[in-house]
Amino acid sequence: MTNPIKNIITAALAPAAILIFTAVSPVYGALEQGNDLSFKLTLGVSRTDNRDTVPNGGYVRGNRRVDKVSDTTFRISPAVQYEKQFPGGYDFRLYYKPSYIWHTNPREGGIESELTHSIDALLGFQITPSTRFVITDNLWWSGDKTWNYGENYVYSPDERAARDDTHYMNKLSAMLSLELTVHLKATIDGSYHIKRYDDNHLAFLYDEDIYKLGGSLTQVYNRHFSFGVFTEYTSFDRSTHGKITDRPAIIDMGVQYLKSGFQASFDLFGDKRFVFNGDTGYNHLWHEADNIPDDSMWGDTTIKLNIYQQERTGGSLGVRFGKQYSDIFPYSSQGDNSFYGSIFTTIGRPNMRNVKVGVDGEWRRREYKAYNMDDDVGADRWYSWLGANGYAEKGTHNNYWLRVWAKYRITQNIDTSVFYSYEEVVSDVNNDYSAQIFGGSVTFTWDTMRSIF
């Protein structure tokens, strides 16, 4: 999908990425002092009752019945972080975390163990007293894997490719914040998110590019109320054969959309404890596939209440109505309606609040239309495949998710946590299933070099 806006975003963000790495040299000298450096080691375990997201009641594949299967996953994640504020209004943060994960009951042909890596970096500049620039980079990549294949296992073409599915994801973001006057503020922001596979076949199937560019202008009316306007452009670029390798056609699933409108914030008490944020506007979508008509809607809306932690309690509640790129193959775009919330509280005496408990939940309803597919989907017999599996060509996909958790701080350097989560999917366009996961972890923290030696 050729688009000049993409070139502008890439040209602007690529030099900005270099700033993060050029800042490493002065930071390295500060590292020798051993300050502002922290280490963590997390040991975790979780167990699911539905390893393969099998539909409720199971299903029959050939002459074999497939039912839910449990699996336990162990994780070891060391991490190191350096964070520093330098004279002149510079902020720097660098975080690296490798994770080694292994399964006690991997599926036949599935991953038995895996090593992944993630790096997060932030660099902030106070250009003038009223102008600030922040750039962040988030990189994740998969490493070595071991596979669970029996001696007599017959590989399919997809599984042979999956054995070499090394890939990485990177998101580069930048924001410029300006105080034009005491009560008038502006922001300009952009991001570039990519997914890349080493294997050429998988790269053709699953590589992705997401570009975003936006801006806002906000008037602060008083300590309770502010309002303004905003605009945001998003381009999601993905072309794929799909998941069936004998298809001759290329499925175009890319989509672009431009959202513009009004935003407002209301601080209930004027002390930032209960803050309502919201935006609404007009959203127009263009599809990469020539046969899919443009789509648009008024009232693309997000509303959120933030409850900032005071003595004991914090959390958020939110609702979203809108359109965006699709999460489910082979649709290009989807309607997205979400209700979500989280709440937590601390338990204990004022100086000994070592226990924190919380609840998170979400109901997400996505809507799909038959005309939001590339014509090549029909040429690839996707409709017949849907019919053979009992799926509709259009409909809704509902996710229900609930998580209950608790954290306990044993000492200043040792934290433990446990959680239970339940997810249920009710879908016209994919499998219905439910899954329960429970687990726990312990994290050891050392704040500086001196605390270790």
Image (cartoon, grey):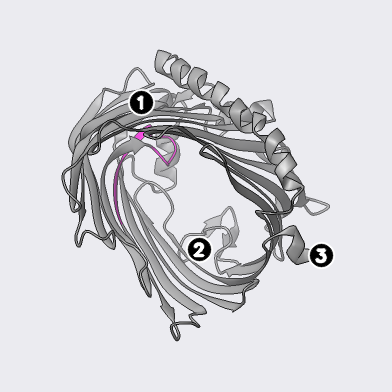
Q: Which mark is residue 94?
A: none
**Residue at which label 3 appears:** 453
Residue ID at (42%, 49%): 430
Can I make out residue 132 in this image? yes
Image coordinates for residue 174, horizontal then vertical, percent: 47, 32
Please tell me which residue lies in front, 211 or 362.
211
The amino acid at mark 1 is Gln
How crowded pointer 3 is (Cα within 10 Å; few <14, some 14-19, many 20+) is rated as: few
The amino acid at mark 2 is Gly
How crowded pointer 1 is (Cα within 10 Å; few <14, some 14-19, many 20+) is rated as: many
Task: Locate the C terminus by quadrant.
Answer: bottom right
How far is the residue under mark 3 from the one under mark 2? 55 Å
Discs 1/2, front: 1
Going from the N terminus, do you reach mark 3 or mark 1 first?
1
Examine the rendered structure and indicate whether residue 334 appears above or below residue 77: above
Q: Which residues are magenta?
A: 326-339
**Residue at which label 1 appears:** 256
Please tell me which residue lies in front, 52 or 317.
317
Residue ID at (35%, 60%): 362
Image coordinates for residue 13, horizontal then vertical, percent: 51, 24
Going from the N terminus, do you reach mark 3 or mark 2 first?
2
Image coordinates for residue 318, horizontal then vertical, percent: 28, 56
Task: Locate the N terminus by quadrant.
Answer: top left
How crowded pointer 2 is (Cα within 10 Å; few <14, some 14-19, many 20+) is rated as: few
Q: Quadrant of residue 190?
A: top left
**Residue at which label 2 appears:** 58
The amino acid at mark 3 is Phe
Drawn side of residue 25 relative to residue 133, left or right: right
Residue ID at (50%, 79%): 355
How far is the residue under mark 1 from the one under mark 2? 38 Å
Q: Secondary structure at mark 3?
A: loop
Q: Secondary structure at mark 2?
A: loop
